[in-house]
Every structure is written in structure tokens, then in C-alpha cells.
Amino acid sequence: MKLLIALAAGALLAHAQPVAVTHVTVIDVEAGRSRPDMTVVVAGGRISAVRQAARVTVPRGSQIVDGRGKFLIPGLWDMHVHMFSALPPGTQDPAARVFFAPNFVARGISGVRSMFDDLGAIRELRAAVAAGTLAGPEVVASGPILDGAPAYWPGSIACANPEQGRAAVRRLKDGGVDFIKVYSLLSRETYFAIADEAQKAGLPFAGHVPNGVTAVEASDAGQRSIEHLLGVFASCSSREAEFARDGAKFGDSMRAAAESYDPRKAAALFAKFAANGTWQTPTLVALRTVAYAGDAEFEKDERIRQVPASIRQIWRGLLADMAKPDAAARRRQFERELTLVGAMHKAGVKILAGTDTPNPYVFPGSGLHDELELLVKAGLTPMDALRSATIRPAEYLGAANGMGSIAADKAADMVLLEGDPLADIANTRRIAAVVLKGKVYAKSDLAQMLLGARKALGGGE
């Protein structure tokens, strides 16, 4: 997988000076416990030792980071992002490099799954990171969305029939994508053709459950992850057959489907997801915006000042549509969505933390911390929420041997916290330092990143 190649290349260019984080409490996301008074040694961009502090000999010349009273977690992954400030996305837009990358790193995010961006812009970002001229996250990318004809978003690849869908998969494979993203307006026939062609090409596919396809069918077709819970409520509904008959509305009937939720059908669906390895990326922080669109509290968020005017212009158009349905009904639906995520997690369905930034009020970087808090509200423990942004993404990407936890021989991507995230998941926001590819970025460095990002494209009003 390209991700592992990128990690190896990054290690070659990693910070040369050894680093030792001493006397720190390591949050072990694999074992599910805290390990107090540990020292973590980093060399060549990878972790070389994780041991009790009294048993470690720190290499001569190491940069020492005092971890007393602090907590060390693996670098976080946001598994649903977009990195553009204009539509359609293009290489002329510097947002990926100058706005999104510093916001991700400054908030402890060492990797992202890009669900719709310009491949040229992604290549430029990757090249700058590999060359060491930019502190930025690892990026796993789909490039353009595959959608029906006409497509919903400019910059998508419109696929009017199965032949066009297959051709689009081959084109994207040649372009170097890591996976295929499917979208809502694909016809049934085209969707299944894309699923088949992606399998032949050795590419995972993920994204929306199209309007004319059920979540059961998507899972059986091998869709690797379902985003935003699309199609899930309908397949948990006592009225599933009714929704399926009207395929044009199947994916857009979440509220009606949720009102006829059938626990027995839900249990069967969740068992299928678990058996088939169908992951869920709920993007609760984005769904919360839909639920509370029009709420004046959003505009009081101090983070708005950091958002470029070009992105806020996109927000205005999206918010106008979000605020149309009945506000009370939207908020009831969000509570159902939280409950659904908790039920899936309890049933063994694997959850990925993703935000859908830069949707309205879904802030790049810090939005992932919002998502972790919402996952805990949905019923995950703080440890499980952390896993959804660390070891779970590594497992999903087939890279758990090289990243996702704090262990010897894994990538030296870590976040030093000033509070215990297992006591309060909100403590993931209290970042004392970030270690990225073995290089330490102190709190003052991270503040400068955020300041530079705000100035680069112009902050909000």
C-alpha cells in the first residue's frame, strides 16, 4: 500500500536527532490501559523503545522532553476530510498546504483520509511533506468522487452507466488513488459495476450508500466503509421494503426510517457489518451541524475567526439548505444518530473517527476533538473513542504493524497531553507538544503554525 511506502520515505527524511519523552504516562490503545512512568525513545523517525523509565538508557545527544504529569497518545487520524477552499477543487488552490496541513498538525493529527480533493494538490502536499519543507499529515486519497450523471458536486466524475463507472475506476487507479469513493446518485447497475471493477483493480471502495442501494447490499458488495450513516437507518427499519421500492428516495429517508427503527432488523444488519468488515464513519460533528443549523451559538465559536472567507462563503450556501427542515425534528434525529452509533459499537461494528471538514462549523484539526467527544456521548468509552482515531484507522488501512499505537518499530507520531484523556476525552485538546516523524513541535511551534495558517488565506470576519 502507498501509505506504507510514504511512511518509509518519511522515515528517511525524519528528524535526525534522537528524542526521549521521559517519565510520561503512555496511553496504550492496543492493551486498553495506561502505563505510568514510561520513557519513549525515538530514532530515525520511528519509536525504538517504550519501557519503564528506570530501565531505559537514553541515547547520548537526545532531545529530552519531560513527560512528568503528562500523557502520551498516538498521533490522531481524521478519516473523513476535504482539503480545498473552492469548488471544483484544483491545483491552483493552496489550501491543502497552507491552511489544512498546519491546522491538522497543530491539533495532533498525523494522518487523514481525503474523501474528495484534487489529486494534483494532494501530490504537491505529499511532496512538500516528504521533502521536509512542510509539516503535514500522511494522506490517503480517493481523488474525485464517482457519482451519477449529472453529478452532485463539481469536480466529480459523472458515471451515466456501468461502462463509464468501470472506466472511471481504471482511470483513477492509473492516477494513483488509494481507494475509490462512491456517491449518492450512482444507479444500482453502475454502483455494482464500480464495486466489481474496484475489486479487480485491487482498490478498496468507500463512501455513500447510493440512493437506489441498501446498506445490506453495499456491505455484501464489499464497501469498505459507509459514511454519515447513510442507508443504515433504512436497513434497520420495519418499513425497509417500502423505502427500497422507491429507490430514488432510499438514501434520503433517514428521518422517516429512524422513526420506524426495528431492533431485530438492526441486530441483523450490525451482525452483517461486523462479519463483512463494513466500517462506519459517522461524522457526528457534521451531522450535528445539520441538526442545529441556524443556532446562533455556532457563530459564537472563536474558531470561526481562523476560517478563510472563501470557505465561509461555501458554508453560507450549505447552511441555507440545512436549516430548511423543522429544527425540532432535526435535533430529534441527531439524538437517534447518537444512539445508533452506540448500538453499532456495542454490536461489534468498527467505528472510525472522521469529521467531514470543512463542512459548516466542522473545523479542520480541532473538529476531530469535537468528534471524539460526540463518540463518547454516543456511548463509546474514552479509550474506544481514542482507538477510533488511532489503532482503528491503522487496522482499516492495513498498516497496524507500522502505526496507530505507541510501540517499538512504529512511526514516531505522538501527541503529548497535559491531561488524562481517559478521565475526560476533552483532554485531547490540551496539547503540550506534537511529535511528527520523530520531530518535536512544542506548544509555541504549534501556535505559530495556526497563526501562519490563518494569515495564509485570510481568516474569517
Image (tube, helix red, strand yellow):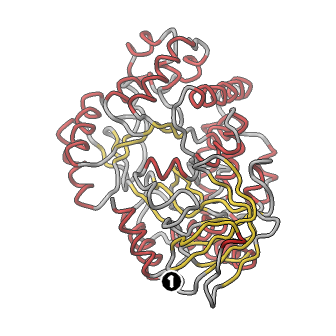
Q: Is residue 109 above or below residue 64?
A: above
Residue 404 visible here: yes
Residue 248 left/right relative to 239: left
Who's the residue at 40% across and 57% down the image?
141
- Tell which residue pokes out farthest to the bottom in this image: 61
Where residue 405 appears, as percent x and y from the top left, is 56, 57
Please tell me how crowded label 1 is: few (under 14), some (14-19), or many (20+) other residues with Cα within 10 Å: few
Quarter the C terminus occupies: bottom right
Q: Which quadrant holds residue 376?
A: top right
Where residue 394 appears, as percent x and y from the top left, is 48, 53
Residue 272 left/right relative to 81: left
Along the viewing direction, whichever of 397 and 221 lies nearer the viewer: 397
Q: Is residue 291 above or below residue 448?
A: above
Residue 277 left/right relative to 233: left
Q: Secondary structure at mark 1?
A: loop
Who's the residue at 80% across and 69% down the image?
68
Along the viewing direction, whichever of 350 and 155 lies nearer the viewer: 350
Where residue 96 appears, as percent x and y from the top left, is 51, 67
Where residue 155 appears, as percent x and y from the top left, is 38, 54
Residue 458 visible here: no
* Residue type, mark 1 in image: Thr
Q: Is residue 389 above or below residue 45?
A: above
Quarter the N terminus occupies: bottom left
Along the viewing direction, whichever of 16 and 459 lies nearer the viewer: 16
Number of marks in the rendered image: 1
The residue where tag 1 is placed is: 133
- Tell which residue pokes out farthest to the left in this image: 163
Residue 142 left/right relative to 315: left
